[in-house]
Amino acid sequence: MAARLPPSRRADYPLCETIASRWADNDVYGHVNNAAYYTLIDSAVNRYMIVRAGVDIHSGPLIALVVETGCRFHHPLTFPQHIDIAMKVARLGVSSVTWHIALFESPAGAQSPAAADAHFTHVLVDRATRRPEPWPDPMRDALTAAMG
């Protein structure tokens, strides 16, 4: 069996946003529930896709659909706590993008270990046909700017 990868460090990521955990994020064990991590990750990545890459989720001809996610948990986050969601584009394909995301106790120093490491892959598709489409230059430029 392969050795478990160590947590990533905050310095590994060029992008970061800080959010506050919510009372509803905690589970009966007193820490942020695993499903809440995915909500935080989904929100951060999609915010970048909308604000920086220009994906128009309401009426644009192209939309980005999630095709794969995964998460490794290292130590718990709790409420009330601020969380740094750090991200970078790990791979940019013709019509896909794979993000690496890490969640940290905030404020995270450069060598702080991640509480969780995740990956998240979008594929750009035509809204009507759901067939893959290549990234238009402005979107590709925004994604390239996020590469780590």
Image (cartoon, rainbow, N blue to C red):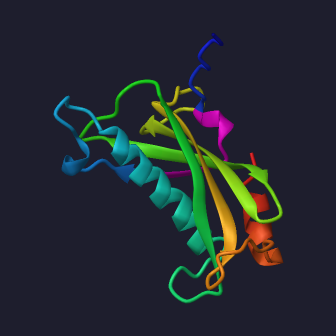
Residue occupying image coordinates x 64% and y 35% = 11
Residue 129 is drawn in which quadrant? bottom right
Residue occupying image coordinates x 53% and y 32% = 109
- Magenta span has 11? yes
Q: Furthest residue to the left? A: 28
Residue occupying image coordinates x 48% and y 51% = 41
Q: Position of residue 145 (x, y in %)?
A: 76, 60
Residue occupying image coordinates x 78% and y 76% = 138
- Magenta span has 34? no
Residue 122 is drawn in which quadrant? bottom right
Q: Which image quadrant: the C terminus? A: top right
Q: Position of residue 119 (x, y in %)?
A: 60, 43
The span picked out in magenta is 10-18
Q: How many marks?
A: 0
Q: Which image quadrant: the N terminus? A: top right
The one nearer the camera, 85 or 109, is 85
Q: Position of residue 82 (x, y in %)?
A: 35, 44
Is residue 135 depicted above or below 128 in this figure? Answer: above
Q: Is residue 89 left or right of residue 115?
A: right
Q: Position of residue 117 (x, y in %)?
A: 54, 35
